[in-house]
Amino acid sequence: MPFWGVSVVAVLLGLVLFVWDLGSIGLVDETPPLFAASARTMAETGDWLIPQVNGLPRYDKPPLVYWLMAALYSLPGQRLWDPWGSWSAGLPSALASGSTLVLLCLLTACWERRVLGEPQGLWLVAGLLYGLSPLVILWSRIGVSDSLLTALVALAMVSSWCAFISMRVPWWLCWLALGLATLTKGPVALVLFGLCWAGYALLEQNASRVWQRLHPLQGVLVSLVVAAPWYLVAFLREGTPFVESFFGYHNLQRFTQVVNRHASPWWFYGAMLLVASLPWSPLVLLGLWRGLRRGQSLPRFAACWLLAVLLLFSLSATKLPSYWLPVVTLLCVGVCAWGRVWPSLSVLAWPPLPCGSR
């Protein structure tokens, strides 16, 4: 199937899985209503700098997802076609997950042609693995920042990989995505990106090539140009409370101490690896081992990405299931690269690719 056909099928699949019947359950739990209320306040007051709830600033997340929600709340007649506001609050997450699904399908289709020489339908399997993951389905239909972060991190990882193997993708695209991710949930995206590529460079012993292809010094500057202005203006207006709350409490303290009683054992994300990849968990474990042993390839890169997320968040004192969302993206590609999975219920592992394949 040509790439335009892959795109059409992936878009339709994303609309069915994530947008269809969106908002029918309303806003549940504590956090989504706070996001929705902050975004509606932005639209009503015209103050788009700092999210607020009941007149009090909400420093826990940067504003990008709030801006997207507020833009929907600002549409003419919004209260008529979305009186409860749940559709406007959830649509950014749904579209982010749909975009991630399309990206994964295109990446896998490209990998099939590049490595296997002919299409085998694995792009559809990758899309279904992602779209039917219990974790993805849940967070794609609630108005929080996790799905948007996942989409931007996926774009950063995929575009950086394509730039690394010289697929005519500009090196700055991944850093632009990381800048937007930093405007979505803080600097964690940059940390994960650095860990993944450092691990890959260490395994491949090609740090110089990674440095030459990804231009990290210029790249970090691109990310700062995108994200830093909001942080600077927020600091100038809000002062020390913003720094202490956002960087101190919601970033450093979440890593070093248990916040909001979200404590879990050290093996929590090992269990998430198995749950989020059901029913393909055995293939994922086998493939992870193969990916780490295999030479210069997308499977090894996917394995490094998985281990970067697993390591960072296993060390974090505060643990939430949503922290695992970014790894589900390349994990789905990795499953297709690590073992041959057909849309039926059968699972067939293939022999490892030659060491030099990509």
Image: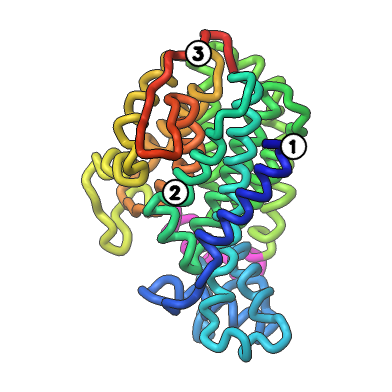
Task: Give neighbour class at mark 2: few <14, some 14-19, many 20+ (Cα, 10 Å).
Answer: many
Quarter of image, res 357: top right
Marks 1 and 3, how far apart at CA:
30 Å
Q: Please give the range of residues in magenta.
A: 234-253
Q: Position of residue 41 (x, y in %)?
A: 59, 82
Q: Where is residue 296 in the image (x, y as percent from the top left)?
A: 55, 15
Q: Which amino acid does label 3 sit on?
A: Leu
Q: Please tell me which residue is depicted at 46% across the width and 77% down the height of the picture.
A: 24
Main secondary structure type of the part rendered in magenta = helix
Q: Where is residue 358 in the image (x, y as percent from the top left)?
A: 59, 18
- Please say whether residue 161 is visible from this viewpoint: yes
Quarter of image, res 340: top left
Residue that carries the numbered disc 3 in the rendered image: 353
Left or right of 38, for residue 289: left
Residue that carries the numbered disc 2 in the rendered image: 325
- Give 154 or 52, whichever is nearer the viewer: 154
Q: Which of marks 2 and 1 is in front?
A: 2
